[in-house]
Amino acid sequence: MDFAFLKKISLPKLGSVFGRSRSIVGIDIGDASVKVVQLKKDQERAVLETYGELKTDRYLKKSEGMLGGGVLRFIDADIASMISDVISESNVTAKEAVVSIPSTSSFVTLVEFPTADRAEVTKAIPFEARKYIPIPISEVALDWQIIDEGDTAQPGERTKVLLVAVPKEILSKMHRIFEITKVKIKSLEIETFSLVRSLIGHDKSPTAIVNIGAQSSSIVIVDRGVVMLSHTIDRGAHELTTALARGLGITAERAEAFKYEIGLSDRPEDREISSVITPLIELQLSELQRIIASYNRGTERSIEKVYLTGGGSRLKGIIDYTARRFGLETTTPNPFTRVTYPAFMQPILKDVGPSFPVAVGLALREISTK
Ligand SMILES: Nc1ncnc2c1ncn2[C@@H]1O[C@H](COP(=O)(O)OP(=O)(O)OP(=O)(O)O)[C@@H](O)[C@H]1O
Ligand SMILES: [Mg+2]
């Protein structure tokens, strides 16, 4: 599966990935940490060369208020030095990178046109886009894909188009940041599509990917391998840390450890901690459930399963809790399953996997064997 989105606005080639070095690094700049995954194409396989994660809190202090308010609100020099450090600490050798655009800094919308005439649709897209994108169209880079619904398409009636837009301000910021770093941008991709590439593969069933980040969480609904909806909510795993620290009068470090070790435990001796966490998770899941329910009302193909991912999905007990809450099969897929690595790394990659779906998907974009 290959998503053409934002290829139009990628930088020109700065050197070939398949030249002297066949390695490429995926860089996911998140609110809590920056993650890197370096892959190398070896015949038809994507081989894991290295990966790493670096917490952002030491680096990102001064903010400058960017659109969407995500991690890109911080100043260029600080983001660049964080990227340079994670690159050297993780022994990344690739010279080119595929870099994520946060979902909070982009718009992804499915729009229906009341005609099957594709030429007409293509002409109408820039005009229609104005209705869906809340900032002036001259200030965004716009891309789209006509969704081919295969057997169920009703010729002569309608065309579904996935509209994708990224503010130009975000793109120029990315380019400014990577002018400072040694590693250069090969392409940029909205994280939504990286998630789908690393987690869905050839699966055709209607699936909700729930990515629980630090300050925000996103839900992406995918059917027949196509993104049908992408939505971000302003709640994430960090609010659990803040609530625990405040509620129990403990440090943020201690609160983090409680999330990892106790989480949603139902043992009576853990109640002091789980009773702080549970109502917040309940709020997050009820917002997400509303999105799923509203999607299901408008379709004949209801969501069959949930893929929980992101650092927040590593909270102890959250998988079972979500499965019960949504009444749907819920798992945390391992994004590294599409990558070749030494067998001894299996347990560690399974453990850290939920933090890396975006970085793996980014690197796979340029190394994809399909
Ligand atoms: N093992 C774990 N157990 C519980 N929580 C965890 C674990 N590992 C990470 N987290 C939590 O996950 C959150 C970070 O998630 P993630 O790395 O997906 O965010 P991010 O990608 O940096 O942020 P965003 O995508 O919102 O920009 C933090 O709040 C952290 O406490
Ligand atoms: Mg993230």
Image (tube, rainbow, N blue to C red):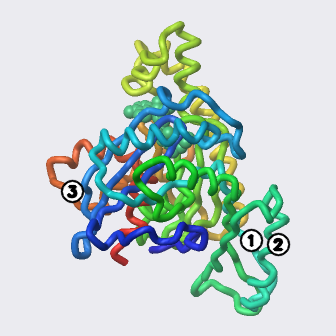
Disc 3 on helix, strand or loop? loop
Tell me the crowding category of disc 1: few under 14, some 14 to 19, or many 20 or more residues within 10 angstroms, Cα based: some
User: Which image quarter is the C terminus in?
Assistant: bottom left
Please name the amino acid that badge 1 sits on.
Val
Q: Which residue is mark 3?
A: 341
The residue drawn where x is 49% and y is 47% is 180
Does any portion of residue 315 appear in the rendered image? no
Please name the amino acid that badge 3 sits on.
Tyr
As rendered, which of 193 and 147 lies closer to the eye?
Answer: 193
Q: Which tag is nearer the camera, tag 1 or tag 2?
A: 2
Q: Name which quarter of the figure residue 276 lies in.
A: top right
Disc 2 on helix, strand or loop? helix
Q: Which residue is mark 2?
A: 128
Q: Which mark is residue 156?
A: none
The residue drawn where x is 61% and y is 81% is 149
- Report whether 142 appears left or right of 216: right
Q: CA distance from mark 1 to mark 3?
A: 40 Å
